[in-house]
Amino acid sequence: MGSLSANMPRVAGESRVAPDWRRVAYLLHVSRALDALEEKTLVPEKKVLYQFSARGHDMAQILLGLGLDHRHDAACGYYRSRPMLLALGVAVEDALGSSMARAGGYSDGRDIGVVFNYPNRQGASALPMCGGVGAQYTPTVGWAQAVEYHRTVLRDASYEGAIGVVLGGDASVASNGFWAALTAATTQKLPVLFYIEDNGYGISVPGHFQTPGADIAANLASFGNLHVLSGDGTEPAEAAALIAAAQAHVRGRQGPCLLRLRVPRLQGHSFQDTQAYKPAELVAEEWARDPLPKLRAQLVPALMSGAEWDALAAEAAAAVEAAREAAERRPVAAPETVLRHVFAEGEAPVLGGLRAAGIAPRATDTAPRPEGARINMVTAIRRTLEHELDTNPRVLLFGEDIGPKGGVHAVTLGLQEKFGESRVFDTSLSEEGIVGRAVGMAMAGLMPVPEIQFRKYADPATEQINDCGTLRWRTNNRFAAPMVLRMPVGFFKCGDPWHSQTNEVQFVHAPGWRVAVPSNAEDAVGLLRTALRGDDPTMFLEHRAMLDTAWARRPYPGDDYAIPFGSARTTVSGDAITVVTWGAMVERCEEAARLSGHSVEVIDLRTLMPWDSAAVLASVARTHRCLIVHEDLRTGGFGAEIAAVVADEAFMQLDAPVARLAMPDIPSPHNPVLLDHVVPSVVRIREKIDALVAF
């Protein structure tokens, strides 16, 4: 029995190392046995609730996974990617136990079993996949960019040759995430492989609805800086040659590659899908392309006998049965543990953030040490970013126009000139790409500081923002993605529906995100530094009206000054009424308190997640009245949460109803006269204070 490598077709750039075909065959049998066990037994018994067969996709995926052997390689797949996970080294018991939602495995039963992750310090990792189609692309590109940063800026030779690989189906090439990732990878010439499994359908929708001609490889043939390969993923030799060539191209730092392999989906999209929308002749044609008998025909008798092939199948079946017995013995996770790991708890994840990389952030000081003249918020934020860039080489700033221009609000002015384009850089116009890349960078041990130019522009990145926040929880602290997402919010000299929204409540309602809303330069420094040296993704909201206003100016409080999140500040003391506010409304509330003639206590929350309910309740216990003022819309605004807590926990101490003053439920109007009519003003705040005190 001779080697098969001599008979394999040659593809430019391909490695001459032949696959371990025995390993390929064994893992293919394991994958098929897992699919059969789930379909015939575990799904009917309701022990597996979500099942996606990999039949037809499996052989090529195994070849792909076996080629990922660098310890800084990372791949991110989708719901049909279990064969690749097996090839990366995921234990069969973990794979099956995760499908059964038992303790251990990918998520401790928190996430669907096919939504996998695999942090691997000894070899290639599988980045946490997401439930949304196309959401896997930009984080993988971020990982690839981090690989290059480690290699070229931090000069870590261990990253030489590492790559990122992202898997997607043919339907996913229509998604925002795919095009955002493709743009970033090609403009930056990043070491990433786009591996597209084309089975012709997105559930029931044919491929010609996803891309013209139903062939993304043909459509991208002339795309700049992209090496495009295409072929049959069911032919063992052809698939192996194409995968080897694609990986060699990317490892050789020749730029990104897109590899499209045609594969049949031999079962429905999921267990419930009968494929009734497919003509019978098409189903027959697909089964005729099954890679399992094709692999047998290639290996028997060239590499092994029929008996050896059958023995491999029996060995795989026995391994799956043993894994089933072990998985059945696994308990369901203790229900109370499901509340853990929304935020960092002191225990570093396996991958993600500075602590997982073995780096302890610099110590902080909660006491301000004012120095120099009063500075505005723009200068305070810039100086804080500059210091952290200077003292932590893993900090990166990026976004639209933050380079030579210094940002549309001049916050990053001069930072690229000082730290270079590898540390402070512009991006393509894609918020999905900005935030998604930051997720991948954070998982690779960097501290990304992405910027979204205005609050409304974050909407295209909503999926990445939400997925980032849940990442630590849904992987049960196996992965985390700490970052600081800077975002100007609110009105300035005028308003409008596109640049002047706050809507901070949306981020408060996104589990896993810290939310900071400084009202002045000193607090901006303290909160930003806490975020930059912290372990959680943080939304840092910079109010446009406060960036250069005289009221918000404060002396710089020192290079290590940090404010613990969830620590409000009482800016005005009083005993007649408590006014709770944040952001641009703090100045107005202070002025209204002064003009009212009453003994008013003003509390600046400073952070909304977490928020200092203890300080608010303690104040209300003294004043017996509470007014909440915010710029965001009244209905469903964060003030409603504060009011509910006060009513729930301090009802018997109230001498007047809990009141809110906020924007009516309309977008921010452009004309200053119209804007002043709807944003809480000093006059209206004072009138509300008077009414509540007189109640």
Image: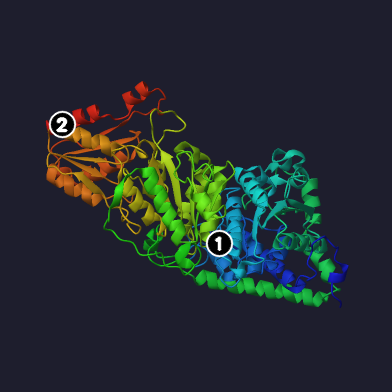
* Residue at the spot 85% in from the left edge and 66% down from the top edge: 8
* Residue at the spot 45% in from the left edge and 68% down from the top edge: 359
Q: Name the residue under label 1.
A: 117
Q: Name the residue under label 2.
A: 596
Q: Residue 458: x percent and y percent?
A: 49, 41
Toward the front, the furthest residue is 372
Which amino acid type is shown beneath numbered disc 2? Answer: Ser
Q: Are marks 2 and 1 in contact (CB under 8 Å)?
A: no
Q: In which quarter of the image is the N terminus?
A: bottom right
As drawn, 543 above or below 72: above
* 3D distance between C-alphas at marks 2 and 1: 57 Å
As drawn, 463 above or below 155: above
Q: Residue 276: x percent and y percent?
A: 70, 44
Q: How many labels does the image show?
A: 2
Foreground disc of the pair 2, 1 = 2
* Residue at the spot 82% in from the left edge and 64% down from the top edge: 237
Q: What element carries label 2?
A: helix
Q: Residue 669: x percent and y percent?
A: 40, 25
